Image: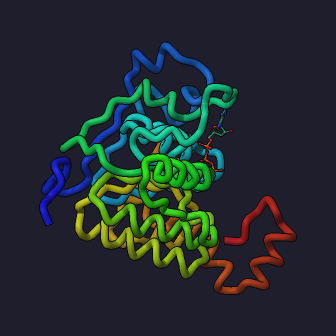
Amino acid sequence: MARRRSDTSLPAPFLQRLRVRPEKLAEHAGYPFDLPWLGPESFELQFTQPVTIIFGENGTGKSTLIEAIASLSGYDEAGGGKGYRPVDHSGALDKSGAGLAEVLRASWLPKITDGWFFKAESFFSVARYQDEMAIRYGGMAPDYLSWSHGEGFLRFFEERMSRQGIYFMDEPESALSPTRQLELLRILHGIQQAATSQVILATHSPILMALPGAQLLEITRHGLAESHYRQSAHFKLYQSFTTDPEEFIKEALAHPDDLPF
Ligand SMILES: Nc1ncnc2c1ncn2[C@@H]1O[C@H](COP(=O)(O)OP(=O)(O)OP(=O)(O)O)[C@@H](O)[C@H]1O
C-alpha cells in the first residue's frame, strides 16, 4: 500500500521535548499556570519512547498536562481528531488545561499532524459528532455508540490507532474491564514495538503502567520523574490487596490515613 504523504519512516517519539517559556509563564496567573510542578526553571519533559505513560494521584495535573500537549499539537481540548470541534466552548465558564499550551514550546522530529486526542469524558460527544459529520457529507457513520461503553472504546482504539499518528489518551481504562485493558495493552505494545506512532497517555491502571519498554513518568507536586511500575504506589497498593484482600481491606477500613502497604 502506498504511504500517505504525511507518513514518516523516522521512528517515534516524534514529539521529543517540551519546555516551559518562562517569559510567557510570567504573564499568567491562576489555573492552569499555578500548578506546582510548572516552575519556570524546572519544567522540561523529554519523550524517550513511542509510548509515554503518566501516572499520579488525583489532582496532580495529568489531565491538564495531556490537554496542554494535545492543544499544542493542534487538538481541541474536548478531544477528537484534528480540526474537530465536538463541543461548543462559546458559553463555557470552565477553564481548561489547553491554555497552558501558550507557555510551552515543543520540539518535533518530524512534526506529525495525524492522530487523535482520546478523552473518556467526551467520548460520547466526539462519537456523536463523527456520526453527524459522516451523515452530513454522505459517508458511513462509524456508529460507536451502538456498542457497549467499553466495546465502543476498544473498537475505536483498534480502528484509529492502526494509522500512523500521535495519540493522546486521558484515562482510557475508565470504561474497560481488566480483560479489555489487556486488549488495549496489546495495541499499545504493538505501537511501542513498531515505533511508527507515538502515544502519550495518563492512567491509573497498573495493567497499562506495566507496558514493557514504555517511558513511565510519575507526576507529583514536585514535578515529573521517571519511575518503575513495581516501585509505584499504585502497583504496591494492588499487590498488597491481591496478596491478602481481607487483611488489606480490614486495615484500610480501620486506618484510613495509614495505607497498609
Ligand atoms: N477548570 C479548572 N479550574 C480551576 N482548577 C482546576 C480546573 N481543572 C482542574 N483544576 C485543578 O487543577 C488540578 C489538576 O487537575 P487535573 O484534572 O489535571 O488532575 P488529574 O491528575 O488529571 O486528576 P484525576 O486523576 O482526578 O483525573 C486539581 O487540583 C484541580 O482542582
Measuring from the top left, give residue 11's x and y in whole percent: 18, 57
Q: Is residue 48 left or right of residue 257?
A: left
Q: Is residue 170 above or below residue 239?
A: above
Q: Is residue 223 or residue 120 the one in the foreground?
A: 120
Quarter residue 233 falls in = bottom right
Q: Is residue 67 above or below residue 180?
A: above
Measuring from the top left, give residue 143's x and y in whole percent: 54, 63
Q: Quadrant of ligand 1?
A: top right
**Residue 113 appears in view:** yes
Q: Is residue 6 left or right of residue 208?
A: left
Q: Residue at x 52, y 74 (%)?
A: 181
Q: Residue at x 37, y 56 (%)?
A: 199
Q: Residue at x 60, y 31 (%)?
A: 89
Q: Is residue 79 or residue 237 the one in the foreground?
A: 79
Q: Is residue 31 above or below residue 259?
A: above
Q: Residue at x 31, y 66 (%)?
A: 191
